[in-house]
Image (cartoon, rainbow, N blue to C red):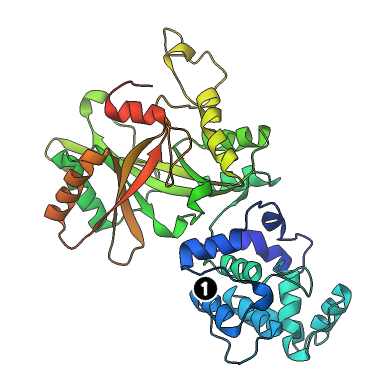
């Protein structure tokens, strides 16, 4: 999913500058990201060779530089192409405004060969560089991100308009499906191998750095917005992506008549007397600036977003200052081990469709993962189950093990 909200206004020459998200990041995101997702070994960019740079360009989907000596103009040209801005760059030397690139570069105090002028000018206005001197890895990573080959995010928690973006994002989601995956998932649920699963579209995946990332699930608009506000109120910043998911589970009629179907909710009879519920939910993925902030997230949830027996009255009405629609069993997890030893290890069982565009995910205890994989294999032998360790908050661990409801 292209991060057009981040760079488009600047690319069009407006006053919004796109580099704020980069400057706020405390870690060396470019080198670390390229290493984690593209197996690019970091190198000293002051001594970079054409071969070094081509490794990054090719990994990000660009065309290799076919020269023996590295010229920064060639790097900028390839970066603009990776960002999907080549045609925009050409407008800087179009007959309608032939001197636009020259004027932009003069204003910035940059002198480059004419053959590269439009690429530098476009990179400046798009917020991909700030001047003639720049780090190659940072630049190429930012270009890849702009072109959809990096992190996917709505913005940063600290952005002034982040709540507006969150609301617009949430309002645009509705029930989606993948016929084969839903069929497989439903059969696994009805077999008793798992109590439910989530269907997700890969295009929304955040692709954040796992060491700094927590995924937090919920269903209510107001809770999502208030969670962002909670982080802001405690001066914790992070990149944020909202990943829609369809929560699927067996609906028991003894719970009462289900609500009327809507674009975000449906209960369907799939077998005689057995029903499956499809409900819109969300994963909020937060990539924090520091591991300390990531660890601090748990205390915020425990203090302000976890419903417990001592926080409700005899009628079940919340009596403590909690975020709207807080859950008894909040669910949030990391794909890397947490310092907090209360976090427990579970397995995220993921099954992708043939082209990887959709996948179902069922979280289970480690000793139940094999039963899930066997159930999938018996129903759809052509599909593979990926078992990924996740480290899950203690309240959900207590719930899934049957130790406690809170």
Which residue is disc 1 drawn over?
Answer: 60
Work out whether residue 151 or residue 7 is closer to the camera in this orientation and state it: 151
Q: Nearer the viewer, residue 343 or 122?
A: 343
What is the quadrant of residue 368 in the picture?
top left
In the image, farthest residue toward the top: 314
Instruction: Determine the residue positioned at 44% across, 60% down.
Output: 203
Residue 83 is situated, as x and y percent measured from the top left of the image, at 60, 73
Of residues 374 and 221, which is closer to you in this image? 374
Q: Vertically, is 277 above or below 77? A: above
Residue 137 sits in which quadrant? bottom right
Of residue 281 and residue 172, the one placed in the foreground of this image is: 281
Q: Secondary structure at mark 1?
A: loop
The answer to whether residue 268 of the structure is visible from this angle is: no
Residue 254: x and y in percent read 21, 24
Quadrant of the rendered structure where residue 356 is?
bottom left
Locate residue 375 relative to residue 326 in the image: left or right.
Answer: left
Residue at the location (49% across, 74% down)?
59
Horizontally, residue 326 falls left or right of residue 254, namely right
Residue neighbourhood size for the residue with mark 1, other residues' Cα within 10 Å, grouped as few (<14), some (14–19), many (≥20) = many
Q: Position of residue 229 (x, y in %)?
A: 63, 35
Residue beneath the point at 50% across and 70% down: 40
- Residue at 32 percent across and 55 percent down: it is 359
Q: Is residue 224 left or right of residue 392?
A: right
Q: Quadrant of the C terminus?
A: top left
- Residue 65: where, in percent of width, then height? 58, 87
């Amino acid at each position: 999913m292209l991060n057009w909200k981040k760079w488009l206004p600047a690319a069009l020459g407006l006053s919004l500058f796109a580099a704020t998200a980069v400057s706020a990041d405390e870690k060396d995101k470019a080198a670390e990201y390229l290493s984690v997702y593209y197996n690019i070994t970091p190198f000293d960019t002051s001594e970079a060779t054409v071969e070094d740079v081509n490794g990054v360009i090719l990994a990000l989907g660009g065309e290799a530089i076919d020269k023996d000596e590295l010229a920064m103009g060639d790097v900028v040209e390839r970066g603009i192409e990776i960002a999907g801005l080549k045609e925009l760059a050409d407008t800087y030397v179009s007959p309608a405004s032939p001197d636009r690139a020259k004027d932009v570069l003069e204003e910035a105090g940059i002198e480059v060969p004419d053959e590269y002028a439009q690429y530098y000018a476009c990179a400046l206005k798009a917020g991909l560089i700030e001047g003639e001197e720049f780090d190659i890895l940072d630049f190429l990573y930012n270009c890849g991100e702009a072109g959809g080959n990096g992190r996917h995010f709505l913005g940063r928690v600290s952005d002034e308009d982040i709540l507006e973006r969150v609301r617009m994002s949430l309002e645009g989601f509705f029930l989606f499906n993948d016929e084969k995956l839903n069929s497989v998932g439903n059969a696994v649920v009805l077999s008793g191998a798992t109590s439910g699963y989530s269907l997700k579209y890969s295009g929304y995946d955040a692709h954040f750095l796992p060491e700094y990332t927590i995924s937090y699930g919920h269903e209510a608009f107001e809770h999502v917005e208030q969670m962002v506000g909670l982080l802001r109120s405690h001066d914790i910043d992070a990149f944020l992506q909202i990943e829609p998911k369809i929560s699927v589970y067996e609906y028991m009629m003894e719970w009462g008549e289900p609500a009327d179907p809507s674009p975000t909710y449906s209960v369907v009879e799939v077998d005689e007397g057995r029903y499956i519920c499809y409900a819109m939910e969300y994963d909020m993925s937060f990539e924090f600036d520091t591991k300390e902030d990531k660890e601090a997230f748990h205390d915020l949830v425990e203090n302000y977003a976890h419903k417990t027996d001592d926080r409700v009255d005899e009628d079940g009405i919340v009596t403590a200052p909690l975020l709207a629609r807080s859950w008894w069993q909040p669910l949030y997890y990391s794909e890397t081990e947490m310092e907090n030893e209360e976090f427990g290890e579970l397995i995220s069982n993921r099954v992708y469709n043939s082209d990887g565009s959709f996948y179902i995910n069922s979280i289970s205890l480690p000793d139940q993962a094999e039963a899930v994989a066997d159930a999938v294999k018996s129903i759809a032998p052509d599909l593979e189950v990926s078992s990924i360790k996740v480290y899950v908050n203690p309240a959900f661990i207590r719930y899934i093990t049957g130790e406690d409801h809170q």
